[in-house]
Image (cartoon, grey):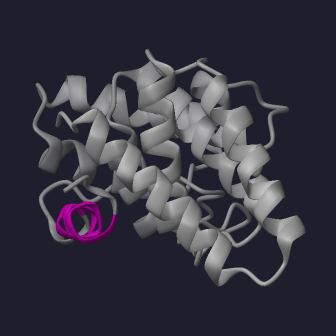
Amino acid sequence: MVISKTFACILFVTFITTQVSVAANTRTNNELRLLLTKAINDKSSFKHRFDAEVWLVDMSARLAPRVPDTRKRIFMLKQIHYEATRAGLYPELVLAVIDVESNFNRYAISRTGAMGLMQIMPFWLKEIGKPGDNLFNLKTNLRLGCTILRYYMDKENGDLTRALARYNGSLGNYRYSKKVYHALDSRWHEP
C-alpha cells in the first residue's frame, strides 16, 4: 500500500505530538524520540529511511500496550521486520502470528511444549537450527518461525490459509488461520 509522504509526515508528527502531550516524563519522550530516530536510520531491512520511519512509528504505537518498554519494543519490531523480509513474508503477517501464538510474550510455553514469540517446537532446532540454540532468544525464535512459515507457504503454493494451518499443526482445521486473519485485519494491517 502506498502512503503519500505528506500523510506519513502528518502521521509521524501527530504520533510524536501525542506522545509528548500524553507523557508526563520528558526523559521518556526524549528516549522514545532517540530510539525511533536510531531505528529509523538503521536501514538493515528497510529500502528507504522514510519507509522505516512510517512503519516503526505506526507499529510501535500499536504494540505499546503489549510491550510497554520502548527499547524492547523498537528492538523487537526491527527484528520482526528484518526476519519477515528476509524470509519473503509481510512483517504485519508475522506480527499477527505472534499476536495469536504468544501475545508477544517471548517466554511463552504452550501445553505442547512450543516456545517463545512464534511458539517454535524444540525439535525444529535439530531440523533447521542448532541444538544448543535458545528458543527464547528473540532473533533465534524469529529466524526459525519465519523460515518455517515461509517453508509452509512454499509447500502450499502460496495458500496462506493452508500454510497457517500447517504452521499451527492443524491442517484441515482453519480455526487458527481465521484467528491470524482476524489479528491481521483488526490490529496489524495498514489501513
Q: From the viewer's side, name the closer residue of 58 and 178.
A: 58
Q: Residue furthest right?
A: 27
- Rendered location of residue 25, percent (x, y): 84, 78
Q: Tell me the quarter of the image containing the C terminus.
A: bottom left
Residue at image point 46% right, 34% down: 146
Query: Magenta stretch mostly in which secondary structure?
Result: helix
Q: In terms of depth relative to the viewer, which is nearer, 160 or 82?
A: 82
Residue that appears at 58% across and 23% down: 128
Residue 90 within the segment the image draws in magenta: no
In the displayed structure image, the side of residue 164 where residue 8 appears, left or right: right
Q: Residue at x 62, y 36 (%)?
A: 79
Residue 115 in the image: state x and y as whole percent. Answer: 65, 58
Q: Is residue 176 above or below residue 123?
A: below
**What percent of the width, then of the height, locates residue 35?**
76, 45
Direction from residue 2 to residue 89 in the image, left or right: right
Magenta extent:
177-187
Above or below, comparing residue 92 to residue 78 in the picture: below
Residue that appears at 22% across and 36% down: 4
- In the rendered image, residue 176, in percent from the top left (x then y), is placed at 26, 67
User: Residue 75's image quarter?
Assistant: top right
Q: Of residues 95 and 36, which is closer to you in this image?
A: 36
Q: Quadrant of residue 157?
A: top left
Instruction: Between residue 38 and residue 150, name the one nearer to us.
Output: 38
